[in-house]
Amino acid sequence: MAAAVAVPAARPTEAKPLSARLTRERLLPDADGMIHLAVHDRGKGIAQAERTRVFEPFYRPAGIGEAAGSWGLGLSLVKQIAERHAGSARCTDRAGGGTSFIVTLRGV
């Protein structure tokens, strides 16, 4: 089962549709009973030294500021919610360029 989802950007003047493909198979628990939800992009990426820091409240990577519509809270909240559900959140580089964010939760 797959579905495409269109989500408008936060600012109507900069609206760029985001499409995502969700597949049921990817949301089934693995052999350890964990579910891994990954979000990938093809942006400029995040330096390895900053990958843990992006989960700190109000932290924004170099060159990203409030003018870009970022306050540095979203990823911090994602990590806190995942950890309160015995899970985790991490940031890695993506093969071919970009970044991957992986949230891991215990399957039910």
Image (cartoon, rainbow, N blue to C red):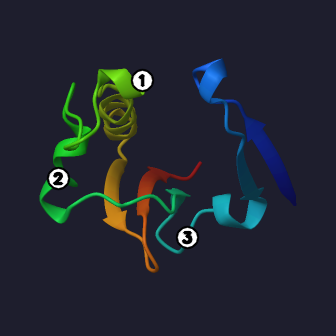
In the figure, is residue 23 to the left or right of 106?
right
Q: Secondary structure at mark 3?
A: loop
Q: Which mark is residue 77?
A: none
Q: Which residue is mark 1?
A: 69
Q: Judge by depth and name the residue closer to the eye, 72 or 30.
A: 72
In the figure, is residue 60 to the left or right of 108?
left
Location of residue 15 (image quadrant):
top right
Q: Residue at coordinates 43% horizontally, 57% vertically from top-left?
A: 102
- x and y, in percent, of residue 22 in the image: 74, 55
Mark 3 surroundings: few (<14), some (14-19) or many (≥20) residues within 10 A: few
Q: Amino acid at mark 2?
A: Glu
Location of residue 79 (image quadrant):
top left
Q: Which residue is mark 3?
A: 30
Q: Amino acid at mark 3?
A: Asp
Nearer the observer: mark 1 or 3; the answer is 1
- Dot placed on the residue nearer the N-terminal end, 2 or 1: 2
Residue reaching furthest front?
A: 13
Question: Marks 1 and 3, how far apart in space?
Answer: 36 Å
- x and y, in percent, of residue 1 in the image: 87, 60
Residue reaching furthest left?
A: 49
- x and y, in percent, of residue 8 in the image: 70, 30
- x and y, in percent, of residue 20 in the image: 71, 52
Mark 2 surroundings: few (<14), some (14-19) or many (≥20) residues within 10 A: some
- Residue 25's place in the image compared with 46, above or below, is below
Q: Which residue is mark 2?
A: 50
Q: Amino acid at mark 1?
A: Gly
Nearer the observer: mark 2 or 1; the answer is 1
Question: Marks 3 and 2, how far apart in space?
Answer: 29 Å
